Amino acid sequence: MNITLIGMAGAGKSTIGRVLAKQLDYTFIDVDRLIKENTGMPLQALIDMQGDLALIKFEEEAILRLNQVDSCVISPGGSVVYSEKAMQHLKEISKIIFLNAPFRSIVRRLPNARKRGIVGLRDRSLKELFEERMVLYQKYADFSVKLKGKESIQETVRKIIELCFEDNI
């Protein structure tokens, strides 16, 4: 079984994902890193040079190549929910956990949001993107973990494990 963490940039997908993978003895897959390796460019440079749709396309391609993976924690970018194909593939190969962080936490964790390679920030505010994506994250999630910003990484990891393996407890 694989576990995919979705949520806004700054929600903690990579940080929580690494700890979760280590605790489960799973492999951690950072899709943003795969895109950087495949394109040779940081995400923001990719957006600046080729636009938002290019990043969405590269992310979709990277995810669709994840075929024979097992026992992995997958951390895609926050914009993955803009690709129906990518999300359907992730649904087929993993349980999808939405890290539902409050907007104030996202803002606090993203002081340089415009330099983070976030799809949509050219046309909309971070708040508008947050509200738009919340609907999509909830649509695709098998489970949602509400983050208040005060819980430890270990508490969040424990919640995810309980949700994903509740049949085995």
Image (spheres, helix red, strand yellow):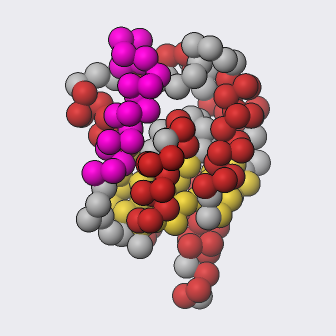
Which stretch appears magenta? 44-65
Q: Position of residue 151 (x, y in %)?
A: 70, 53
Measured along the vertical axis of the image, is residue 14 above or below residue 79?
below
Q: Is residue 85 magenta?
A: no
Quadrant of residue 34 within the rendered picture: top left
Q: Residue furthest front?
A: 85
Q: Does residue 61 appear anywhere in the picture?
A: yes
Pick whichever, 123 or 32, lies toward us: 123
In percent of the image, x 69 and y 52: which residue is there? 138
Quadrant of residue 126 within the rendered picture: top right
Judged left or right of residue 107, residue 160 is left
In percent of the image, x 25 and y 27: which residue is there? 39
Quadrant of residue 146 within the rendered picture: bottom right
| Rendered-image quadrant of the N terminus | bottom left
Pick whichever, 126 or 159, lies toward us: 126
Q: Position of residue 153 (x, y in %)?
A: 59, 54
